[in-house]
Amino acid sequence: SLSLCSVAGSSSMAGVQVDITGAVRLALKPLLSMARGVRVLWQLPRYVDALAREMEDLRDTRADLEDELLAQGGVLAATRLTHQLQRWIHRVDSLEVQLFDLEACLAARSSGPGRWSWSRYRLGRRTTRMLRRARKLRETEKGFQGRRVSVRSIEAVEAVPSSSASIVGGERALAEILQHLRDDSVGIVGIYGMGGVGKTTLLTKINNEFLVAGAHSFDVVIWVTVSRDASLLKIQMDVLDRLGITRSVKGLDKPDQEDVRAKTLFKALSARRFLLLLDDMWEKLDWRKVGIPYPSPENGCKVVLTTRSKDVCTGMDAQRKVKVSVLNESESWQLFCQKVGTEVDLQNPSIQKLARRLAATCGGLPLALITVGRAMADARTAGEWEEAIEILSEAPNKLPGMEDEVLSLLKFSLDRLKDETARQCLLYCCLFPEDHEIDVERLVDCWVGEGFLDTLHSDGLERARNRGLGIIRKLKAACLLECGGSGGDEDSSVKMHDVVREMAVWLTGGEYDPKNTFLVGARKGLSCLPKVKRWADAKRVSLMDNKIEVLPSQFCRCPNLSTLLINRNPLQAVPGGFLGSMPALLVLDLSGTDITELPKEIALLGQLQHLNLSATRIESLPREMGMLMRLRQLDLRETYELSTIPRDAIITLTGLQALNLRESSYCMEVESRDAREVKDEPTLDMVSLGDLEATSLYLLEELGLDILHSSMALERLMGSDRLSRCTKFLRLRVPGVTSRHLSTAFAKLMNLRELRIGPCSGLEELRLNGANGQLSRVEILELNGLGAARFVIGVEDSESSSFCGAPLLSSPPLIFLECLRSLSITQCHGFQELTWVGHLPCLEYLQLAGCAGIKELQSVDGGRSGETDRVDCGGSFRKLKFMSLIELLALRSIGSQPILFPSLEKLHVYRCPRLTQLALGPSSVKQIREVVGEKEWWFGVKWGDSGSIKNTLLPYFKPMGCRF
């Protein structure tokens, strides 16, 4: 019991001691806290300095880590931080932000209460906590030594999902692009084409081609979808993410860190041989701003980009541009059948016929073929196919998938045009028939008539037309218009792809924009005006290429109608009441109709600016035409029955800027005459050359004339500075005209654009010397039926004046027909060789026909013994795209030495029996896409020294029959 008491007593004493210690501690806690607070307040500057030093060390460690990350990126791998170290960096970033805030608070309180304030105490406590965290981060980082980064393999190529395993019709383009990628001299390849043509599919195929090991030598292949509204930040972050360094470097995702991202990217990419694939580009990118090293043979890097605009390829310095074209008929049918599937019996003759028609309406555009094919996957009856054809023709947006997947895609290309005028000009093109080659000159003239091309500062005709040509170039570069040129001259016409046209018809159909409604009935087989309710709201109407013979004498009022195209119809007359219903009409095209006269009510069209009566059977113009004070353009070309043009119909047209009478039967006299014998109108005076000088026609800029019978008319034209200045188109067919007459004319006609000479019986010599800019602006030159007339080029050499087809003159001047694009020489037997043609810097189209004297196209000595240095074969025909040689019975060769045709695309040869050798340089065949000739000629002709040239051209050869 005693022992138990002892134990109990000692336990009791221990408890008392514990209670006393606790009580003391509790009593001293406020004092200790106060002591720490005093120390914090007293030593706050020291704590802040210590925290700043710790933070500086942490920043240095983080920077070293970032450098190590970039430096250790391997050839086929990128370094990535371990997850622990990523958290460590995040905590350092967080602490750094808190330090910035602390320093701001200290700075704000520096002028406030003294050292012993409560707010300063709280800042001190915050500082000590941050200092402990900083020292802990320093200790934690030491434990990461040797395992700061883990190298996780980044695939050299990442697969890009593809909607199809095959690329129907794209094999040739793919092969060409891959060839460029193997060419060390090519760093940037641009792939361009209209929306939906398959550019992304091709780029995907290129990317996935490299998934096979050993298929390439790039360290990394990077895919970036640029898209419509992509920012520089997105592009940079996509590349950084592909390299695995997106989250590894502080602040890269901040919008204001553009330069930091660029430097980081440049450093990372400079250590790799990369292939960068940029899909769907809309604007030029600045390589420096993005941070992408410029591809060069030295670094072995490549860039392939896709875009809808050729201008983007140019802006991105693409050394090779590959246009992705639409599919041909066979390829279109193959793709269409794939998408229709096996549920539809396409072998059924009735269905197959309709299916092929429907596929043809897609114009070879893969996206349209895919969309329409899928929409028809359940169409098992002929009636369903007929309905689809009608819908796609009249309202393509009603076919399932067309509006959302095809038309809207193309509309975005239209919306991206920065120029509203360009958008209006493109929509105007849908007034022309499907698959129609639109004459550029006539199209631009319609735009001028609509007022699209006028500016605030100028409504001059030439400036307006130049602007129109610029818009056409812009639309072609954007792949919204295509080159026409089936006749060889690509610039003379344009085409609108079927689906682009469907998009334009959809946008102008009235539902999308009621204020811009078009009625498009071109080439619809109509025999009368369509009865539609929208005539009253229509802005523009096209009924061209139909079978309309009669127009109603009374018609509903069309107050908004500005364009009426009713050309190429068997129309007999235009009732006055019909014209009177269209007071706002600006453009009226009656060309190619059978009308013989205009009604007096033509005077009611007070706003009319463009009137086209070309190729009609019109016999006379009414005097009331003189009331059209705003008329700017009057086209009377090919009016072979026109005999009467009253003076009053022309001289009062104070707004007239262009008068075209080319190939008209109206005989323009030197001065006005009393036409007493013309239609029994004894007081009617005919318009003459003298009348065209009237002060009322002071705006006249462009004159097109035929001078057919009298050299006096030519002299009168030359005697007027004003008329010679505005004459742009001239056809001379004057018997007995001399070389002196022509030389004088050439010297005066400084603004001539188109010149046609012949037949001119009795002409012995045609001299073109190019002196003083003679014919320097001529773009089209036709020489026809000059017989044995000698052709003289250059300035006559007094020491050698002998003539031998092309005479022995001094060398052609350096500036000579420098704007000539098209040259046609027919039935001119006095020409023997055409060395001078090779010196024409802009020549694109050349046709030679029926010239019995031509033996050689390019002479070695240039027509002069001892001047072989004048024939620079490397520079000859550098822009020639189309060459046609017809019935040149004496022609032996193009040249005795290989001649370069670097731009030649089409070559036609017919009935040239002695032309058994074509000495083309090897580079001349790169662009050729068509060779037309007789089979016998093809099998017998030799192509220079290289047998491979013929094999290269074989796929493009088209045999022809007896007719050319």
Image (spheres, rainbow, N blue to C red):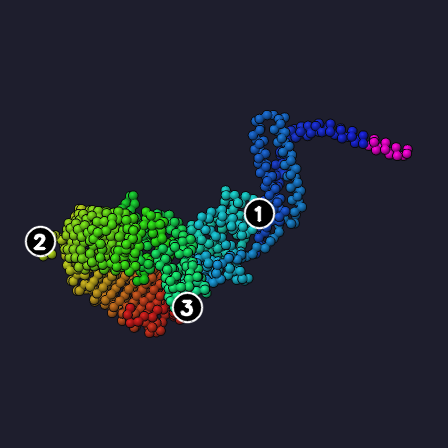
**Camera-side residue of 460 and 756:** 460
Label ID, residue 682: 2
Count of numbered marks: 3
Residue 13 belongs to magenta span: yes
Front position among marks 2 and 1: 2
Q: Amino acid at mark 1?
A: Ser
Q: Is residue 415 left or right of residue 833?
A: right
Q: Amino acid at mark 3?
A: Gln
User: Residue 662 location in percent, x, y?
Assistant: 21, 57
Q: CA distance from mark 2 to mark 1?
A: 97 Å
User: Residue 393 location in percent, x, y?
Assistant: 35, 58
User: Residue 472 location in percent, x, y?
Assistant: 33, 53
Element carrying mark 3: loop
Residue 89 belongs to magenta span: no
Q: Is residue 134 above or below residue 762?
A: above
Label ID, residue 248: 1
Question: Does label 3 or label 2 sit earlier along the sequence?
Answer: 3
Quadrant in the picture for residue 105: top right
Q: Which residues are magenta?
A: 1-14
Element carrying mark 1: loop
Report which residue position mark 3 lands on.
Answer: 347
